Image (cartoon, rainbow, N blue to C red):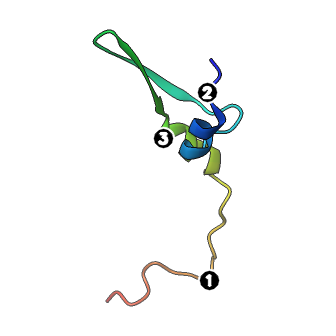
Amino acid sequence: ITLPKAVRDALGLTKGSVLKVELEGSRIVLRKNVDDAISRVRGKFALDPAVDDRAGKD
């Protein structure tokens, strides 16, 4: 299925984006897969080892 560019741009979809397919009555509904977006960025951000999340806690 090819989605119009305006729809892809509005949802931030790129080549390879995963959509969830749901059936609502007699309609097919495509939803952006949030899990896919999370998995694409997982591991891309490094934590600063100098930051201690316990700072300020007694």
The quarter of the rendered structure image containing the N terminus is: top right
- Determine the CA span between mark 2 and mark 3: 18 Å
- Determine the CA span between mark 1 and mark 3: 31 Å
Q: Earlier in the sequence, mark 2 or mark 3?
A: 2
Residue 48 falls in image quadrant = bottom right
**CB under 8 Å between callouts 1 and 3?**
no
> Looking at the picture, which amino acid does disc 3 mark?
Val
- Determine the CA span between mark 1 and mark 2: 45 Å
Identify which residue is drawn at 66% across, 36% down: 5
Percent x, y for residue 47?
62, 70
**CB under 8 Å between callouts 2 and 3?**
no
Of residues 16 and 41, the one drawn nearer to the viewer in this rendering: 16
Which residue is situated farthest in the left direction here?
Answer: 25
Percent x, y for residue 56?
38, 90
Secondary structure under badge 1?
A: loop
Of residues 46 and 57, the one drawn nearer to the viewer in this rendering: 46
Disc nearest the viewer among 1 and 2: 2
Secondary structure under badge 3?
A: helix
Badge 1: few (under 14), some or many (20 or more) residues near its Cα, within 10 Å?
few
State whether residue 34 is above or below residue 28.
Answer: below
